[in-house]
Image (cartoon, rainbow, N blue to C red):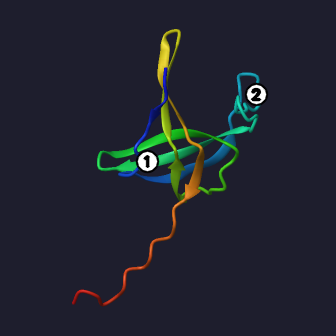
Amino acid sequence: MAAIKVDTSASRYSVGVVPKPKNDMEGRQRADRITGTPLFVTQLIKLDDDGAEIIPVTTPGAPDVGQGAEVRPVNLVAIPWQQAQRSGVAFRADAIEHMPASAPTPKGSGS
């Protein structure tokens, strides 16, 4: 099945659990098939008008993010999968970046 690009513009993301190696059934860390870069999974909390959702996002290399950090997944895609009687959606991104800090709101404005 083909990957589906995810529009992240109307959502906010924060790190629920720091990146961990993505391992196969034997406990070996998986690697990107093309580049050979080790894969990591970062649990993200997605917030939007519909509520909150926890999504595990796989990236090549370990993102430098800590728990609770506001982040942005770069080129996030959803990959539907099916294996025997099981099915689901896997999420993958090129990277997970920190969101730039917002400028503080000036005090005393608007009165």
**Point 35% across, 51% down: residue:** 10
Q: Secondary structure at mark 2?
A: loop
Q: Is residue 7 left or right of residue 65?
A: left
Q: Is residue 25 left or right of residue 83?
A: right
Label 1 crowding class (10 Å Cα cut-off): few <14, some 14-19, many 20+? some
Q: Residue 18's spot in the image, x, y percent?
A: 63, 49
Q: Residue 48's spot in the image, x, y percent?
A: 34, 50
List the residue tagged with mark 2.
Answer: 27
| Distance CA(mark 2)–CA(mark 1) | 28 Å
Report the residue that reaches farthest toward the top.
Answer: 84
**Point 43% across, 40% down: residue:** 6
Report the residue that reaches farthest toward the front.
Answer: 34
Q: Is residue 37 left or right of residue 8?
A: right
Residue 46 disc label = 1
Q: Quadrant of the C terminus?
A: bottom left
Residue 17, relative to residue 104: is it above or below?
above
